[in-house]
Image (cartoon, grey):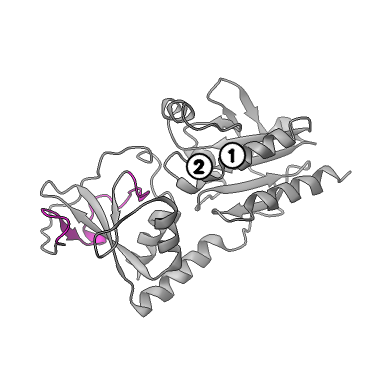
Amino acid sequence: MKQITILIFAVLVLLTFSNCSSTKPLIVSEKSTTQRVSFLPGLSKIEFEDLENPNFLMDGESIPVYMPEGKRIRGMEMMEILMKGDHVPEIYIDDEKEIKAFVMRNATEEEKIEIKSAQEAVFSDSDLIGKTASPFDVTDIHGNVYSLDNYKGKIVVLNFWFIACRPCVLEMPELNELVEKYKNEDITFIGFAPDKKDDIEHFLQKQHFDYNLISDSQATIQEYGVAAFPTHIVINKQSTIDLVLKGFTPTTIEQLDHQIEKLLGEE
């Protein structure tokens, strides 16, 4: 059951930060495999426990993901299928022992229960709410310095994301609208990503994002215990965590907006 939990979290959670924006397949162990699928000639299945390095990014783009009949799924379609909990991804490698594809299979009833439990663990109410926010001193991609100690008496909105996270990208236009709405208020919007500075700058050539963006943010991501992407955290004027929103939902922006309005109205 541990294998199922980890595989599901491969989509919901960034298991490794150093390779999150890399498209280079990860090398697995030399153990032999024999199971194959007809639509992926030359590839064979490997068990999760046979991976030399179990850290990988399953984003639907860097490494393709297929349904059992051979249909490739991407982006939100892939996320919705995995979140439904009826399928489990399996790993396929080539003769060089490199991961080349994921193929979904029908989950057993026992696996469905484990998947649901894993999802509930990720998206359960955060124990961060009401706690003092962890301090940070960071520099954004433009060289501007941000220290939480300088924001006492102010509202700070944090977004944890990464380039290959499709839900993170999909919500950016609405996040930009929030930044515009509150541009005259004493609020700072900061986005933490594990990606390299150059990669973020390249990403911004095609996708607009108005948050103050911090690259190489592994330490801050871990400090805040972020496990699902995107994650939003609102810090109030007393430097206390007031709201934590995990994942991509239709009401995320509305909830953020409501909480900001509420905090602005407090003395």
Instruction: Work out whether 154 lies above or below 123.
Output: above
Residue 169 got which mark? 2
Q: Amino acid at mark 2?
A: Val
Name the spot of residue 76 as percent of width and height, x first: 45, 53
User: Dot 2: within a 10 Å radius of its alpha carbon, few (fewer than 14), some, or many (20 or more) residues?
Assistant: some
Residue nearest the observer in this picture, 11 or 4: 11
| Residue 214 image-quadrant placement | top right
Rendered image: mark on residue 137: none
* Quadrant housing the C terminus: top right
Q: Which residues are magenta?
A: 38-61
Is the magenta region chiefly helix, strand or loop?
A: loop
Between disc 1 and disc 2, the foreground one is: 1
Q: Which residue is mark 1?
A: 173
* Residue type indicated by callout 1: Pro
Nearest to the observer: residue 158 or residue 181: 181
Residue at (82%, 42%) from the top-left corner?
264
Residue at x 10% of width, y 49% of height: 95
Lateral position of residue 161 relative to residue 156, left or right: left
Eyeballing the image, is 202 above or below 224? Answer: above
